[in-house]
Image (cartoon, rainbow, N blue to C red):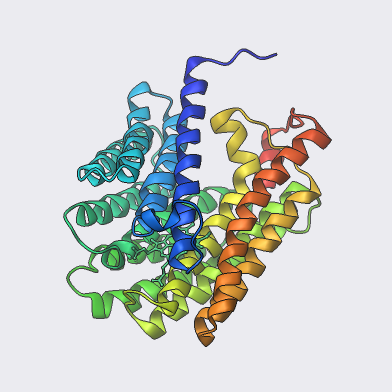
Amino acid sequence: MESLSANVWVRRGLLLVAAATAVTALLGGLARLGVALGWGPSVAVQHGPLLVVGVFGTVISLERAVALARPWAFAAPGFSALGAVAMMAGLPFAPWLSVASCVVVVLVNAVIIRRQAAAFTWLMLLGSLTLLGGTVWWARGAAVFEVVPMWMGFFVLTIVAERLELSRLAPTPRWASLALVGVSVFCAASALVQPWWPRVATPGFGVSLVLLGVWQLSFDLARRTVRLPGLPRFTALGVLVGAAWLTFTGALIVLEGRLPAGPLADAALHGVFVGYVLSMVFAHAPIILPAVARVAVPFHVVLFVPLTVLHVGLALRIGGDLTSHLVLRQTGGVLNVVALLLFGAAVVVARLVTGPKAPRRSAGERAAAR
Ligand code: HEM
């Protein structure tokens, strides 16, 4: 059996904290839908921040720290995980731990640029700056709906940067790559100026999401890899369906403007967070988890089950949001959580059926899988 370094155990420990935080946060989300389970009602208010800066703050900054491979970079997921625990314990300084994590992520991305100055590394830095901006406002007392475009901007720019890096494997017209950078900068700018000019900045932000979604549907490498069997098709479908949700949600934000709460806010938030972000997480988990936690996730066709449940659930949920149909909304929300549980189960099944060791892939195959 391969002996694992202390560093890998630290990474796994951080991922466990993120997973436990996710369970609590999702129970809180269900409570907000009117489905009270376990201790969910007591954490309903923290649902959004727990997921964004607690769970994803830890996971994404861990991935960045692994990429940089410097011990100090692991302070970012460390602060995020501590912030998540402090938030669940109701400690008032919790948001400032998340701010500390964001500062380290910005530094990590800046150092990565010194190693490799490319459009995609600059976009990752821009994404981490929008995360920092949103988290500082939130720590200073701003409401979540006021900072949520900055948090969304972080996810979208990080994912788009990753896809831009891959676009070098597919012949993308130069104008299209430049346009992607331009729209990404506009996305970050319109998210960051929200506190001052929400009436103009919110529709502007929605337009940027539509353009980024349309870009991915038109130029992303996934358009080619969707024709390949196995993992490449699975990943590509996750990417393309996610991009379709991004386009739809951007249009909704343009039409409805800033939404503090309620069914339309639910649709605008989760079209991005579930339709785009979770879909990308499912799609990339078989590639990212082996790199970050040294846990092989072999591809198996059963992985399509949670991906399908996720998107069908979201369609029902948003259908319920738009038609004020509470039961539809609740059913869809519960299915979103079921999809996450099924994903965990599908990974276990895939490992049992295929064996824990994922087949070794060449760099070319790994790239195609993305
Ligand atoms: C998968 C199952 C999920 C369920 C059932 C759920 C449920 C909810 C509900 C009911 C609301 C209140 C919406 C309203 O204003 O009426 C909400 C808000 C929110 N959710 Fe989720 N959610 C889920 C996933 C996620 C994910 C994955 C993220 C982020 C990555 C997220 C981030 C947020 C944020 C930021 C808010 C706004 C919170 C606030 O204003 O305090 N949610 N969620």
Task: Return the x and y of residue 111 as percentages of the image width and height.
Answer: 33, 33
Q: Is residue 111 above or below residue 280?
A: above
Left-right relation of 267 to 239: left
Task: Return the x and y of residue 287 as percentages of the image width and height.
Answer: 63, 40
Left-right relation of 325 to 144: right
Residue at (80% x, 50% y) in the render: 301
Q: Is residue 265 above or below residue 289?
A: below
User: How many labels, in total?
Assistant: 0
Please tell me which residue lies in front, 209 or 39. 39
Task: Return the x and y of residue 352 as percentages of the image width and height.
Answer: 79, 34
Q: Is residue 351 above or below residue 248?
A: above
Task: Return the x and y of residue 226 as percentages of the image width and height.
Answer: 73, 58
* Ligand 1 sits in quadrant: bottom left
Q: Is residue 293 above or below residue 227?
A: above
Residue at (44% x, 51% y) in the render: 39
- Asked which quadrant contains residue 188, the reply is bottom left
Residue 225 in view: no
Please tell me which residue lies in front, 68 or 286. 286
Please tell me which residue lies in front, 235 or 47. 47
- Asked which quadrant contains residue 82, the reply is top left
Residue 32 in view: yes
Residue at (37% x, 22% y) in the render: 71
> Where's the N terminus, which quadrant?
top right
Residue at (27% x, 49% y) in the render: 132
